[in-house]
Image (cartoon, rainbow, N blue to C red):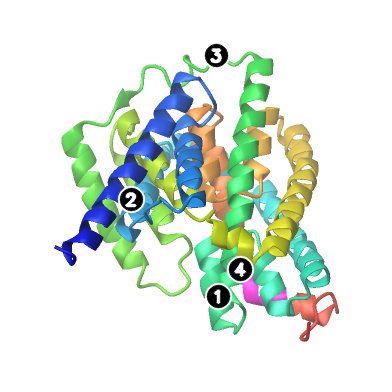
Amino acid sequence: MTQSLPVVRRVGLYALTIGAATGGGALFDALALPLPWMLGSLAASACLALIGQSAKAPSFCVKAGQMTIGLALGLYFTPTVIAALTQMLGWMIGVGLYTCLMSLLGAVFLQRFMGFDGKTSFYAAAIGAASDMAIQAHKAGARGDLVAVSHSIRVAMVVSIIPVIAADLVGQMGVNRSALGSGVLYLPWLQTIVLAVAALFAALLADRIRGFPNVWVLAPLLAALVSAALLPEHRLHPVLVAAGQIMLGWNLGQRFTRELFAESPRLAVAAALMTLAFLGLSLVMALSVHVGLQMNWATSLVATAPGGIAEMAITAKVLNLDPPTVTAFHAVRLVMMVTGADLLMRLGFYLGWLKDDS
């Protein structure tokens, strides 16, 4: 009986967490809040984590959520859309370079504010995929745990702030969201299953390629992109998209435990201040993209925000803010940051902005 108690306890925690995350999403959806299924799930799971009653999201659930978002986004990339996006490649690279500069400035701030070594400061500030940055930090001999905390706070803050601002801008612009994407059918369930299996194999294959960024988002996205080129235009069923958001929200919210704030209160403050600075700096690039490409304010804001590709791209999808453009901007930035992180860090040391010793 005593041996069965931990199992019962775990099952109960999972049931409570999943129920709360889903209920939070449903509540936010009923209140017509932006990005409801992700933000509602995040809020509910964070509340449970703070009182020590949250179950940790299993790795396969997080990956399934990322796959779902990747598939939903990839279906937007028809040949016509891809041709249009190539005209913006120069701007995408420019945003990526600007993000690299922001990352270096953030690393300098963290080293001064926290007294971290240069490597830990850089990877904790680098605006790339959180998992990729933590892995690279560990390989470089930096504090991967501190890097993970910093990225958790950054992504959660951006996900909580940007959708609200973007939704307000959408309302001010008078965009008819119901008309956007009208006439496009949902992908039939049989084809959805086939595509999901193909995406799974693509992700497993990509996972074996060293340095492939954000495998469980980008590999399924590429699989869906191929499908979009061969089949009539379809969208992933909204139930699946909502489920993916719930998984991502659960994964973000579970990190905000009492232990995190008790063990690293100063880092939590530093990461929050750095994120606010990133948001302010990203407005400059959003303005440039808005003026240079005649892109609407909300889309340029989400496309240049210092958040994760999955979270920002799904924000664009939910608000009908040109998901392919937002995804492409973040994908280019992500590839530049993940593949060039070591070189960028070395540049920081060469310029004297970062120091070897704290």
The amino acid type of the residue labelled 2 equals Ala
The front one of 126 and 147 is 147
Q: Which residue is mark 3?
A: 176
The front one of 116 and 222 is 116
User: Label for residue 136?
Assistant: 1
The amino acid type of the residue labelled 3 equals Asn
Residue 88 visible in the current orientation: no
The amino acid type of the residue labelled 1 equals Gln
Q: What are the residue bounds of the magenta stretch? A: 339-345
Q: Label 2 neighbourhood size at 10 Å, few (<14), some (14-19), many (20+)?
A: many
- Say which residue appears at 64% left-offset and 17% top-offset: 171
Answer with mark 4 or mark 3, whichever residue precedes in sequence. 4
Q: Are marks 4 and 3 in contact (CB under 8 Å)?
A: no
Q: Is residue 23 above or below residue 181?
A: below
Q: Are marks 4 and 2 in contact (CB under 8 Å)?
A: no
- Say which residue appears at 54% left-offset and 24% top-offset: 33
Q: Is residue 341 magenta?
A: yes
Answer with mark 4 or mark 1, whichever residue precedes in sequence. 1
Q: Are marks 4 and 1 in contact (CB under 8 Å)?
A: no
User: Label for residue 147?
Assistant: 4
Discs 1/3, front:
1
Residue 345 at what x, y percent from top left? 71, 75
Answer with mark 4 or mark 2, whichever residue precedes in sequence. 4
Q: Label 3 neighbourhood size at 10 Å, few (<14), some (14-19), many (20+)?
A: few
Q: Label 1 neighbourhood size at 10 Å, few (<14), some (14-19), many (20+)?
A: some
Q: Are marks 2 and 1 in contact (CB under 8 Å)?
A: no
Q: Main secondary structure of the magenta part?
A: helix
Answer with mark 3 or mark 2, whichever residue precedes in sequence. 3
Q: Work out how far the residue at label 4 is from the one at label 3, CA to CA, in angstroms.
A: 41 Å
Q: Work out how far the residue at label 4 is from the one at label 2, CA to CA, in angstroms.
A: 31 Å
Q: Work out how far the residue at label 4 is from the one at label 1, CA to CA, in angstroms.
A: 10 Å
Q: Which residue is mark 2?
A: 223
